[in-house]
């Protein structure tokens, strides 16, 4: 039989805060990469056809949404951390996993949005029919981050089962 001290060590919140950090940092890095890569393509497009810039901002907006996913998960995880309540090791690992799930999928989604956004915005300069294909591919890339958000939210609901007494 394990004691309460074994289930709730004083260093357990470290993993929870690592989950907060992973969700925010990795998803934001993915969003920043997607925004910068797509922005470079838009800057190249804008020198030749300034009228197409507004329609070409879709990859930048979709990249920004990836960062919002990380923010939501970070706030939810941080809300479960309190210095006055006991925090189990199980909850720490769940929060770490939730943060990594959201952060890494956000990183992958941002990378995909950046690459696709840059290539398709440049191609849009020469062929306007590529716009619909670009939007569809960007939606599929965005869904990668959404999957991570959903998994993180589901994991975060399991933390309520990890109670320990003082």
Image (tube, helix red, strand yellow):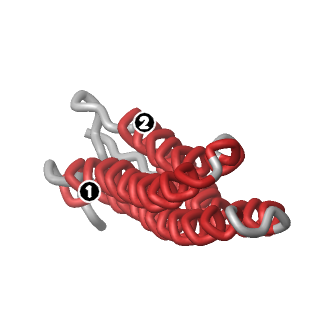
Which is nearer the eye, 18 or 122?
122
Task: Return the x and y of residue 112 as percentages of the image width and height.
Answer: 55, 70
Q: Residue at x 62, y 44 (%)?
A: 50
The correct choice, above or below, for 71 with respect to 43 in the image is above
Q: Quadrant of the N terminus?
A: bottom left
Q: Which residue is mark 2?
A: 75
Q: Residues within 10 Å of mark 2 (few under 14, many from 20)?
A: few
Mark 1 or 2: the one toward you: 2
Measured Cα–Cα span from mark 1 to mark 2: 15 Å
Which residue, as the protein is rendered here, is positioned at the far front?
48
Identify the secondary structure beneath mark 1: helix
Q: Which residue is mark 1?
A: 15
Q: Residue at x 44, y 64 (%)?
A: 107
Which is nearer the eye, 51 or 158?
51
Q: Is residue 106 left or right of residue 119?
A: left
Identify the secondary structure beneath mark 2: helix
Whether residue 158 appears in this view of the structure is no
Q: Quadrant of residue 120?
A: bottom right
Q: Quadrant of residue 30?
A: bottom left
Q: Residue at x 14, y 48 (%)?
A: 10
Q: Residue at x 42, y 36 (%)?
A: 75
Q: Quadrant of the C terminus?
A: top left
The correct choice, above or below, for 26 with respect to 73 in the image is below
Q: Quadrant of residue 138?
A: bottom right
The correct choice, above or below, for 160 with respect to 111 in the image is above
């Amino acid at each position: 039989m394990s004691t309460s001290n074994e289930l709730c060590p004083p260093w357990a919140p470290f993993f929870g805060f690592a989950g907060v950090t992973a969700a925010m940092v990795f998803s934001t890095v993915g969003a920043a990469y997607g925004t910068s890569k797509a922005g470079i393509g838009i800057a190249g497009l804008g020198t030749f056809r300034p009228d197409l810039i507004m329609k070409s901002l879709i990859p930048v907006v979709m990249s920004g949404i990836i960062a919002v996913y990380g923010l939501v998960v970070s706030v939810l995880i941080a809300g479960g951390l309190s210095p006055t309540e006991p925090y189990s090791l199980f909850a720490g690992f769940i929060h770490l996993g939730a943060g990594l799930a959201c952060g890494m999928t956000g990183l992958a989604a941002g990378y995909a949005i950046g690459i696709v956004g840059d290539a398709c915005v440049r191609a849009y300069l020469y062929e306007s029919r590529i716009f619909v294909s670009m939007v569809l591919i960007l939606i599929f890339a965005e869904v990668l981050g959404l999957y991570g958000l959903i998994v993180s939210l589901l994991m975060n609901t399991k933390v309520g089962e990890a109670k320990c007494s003082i």
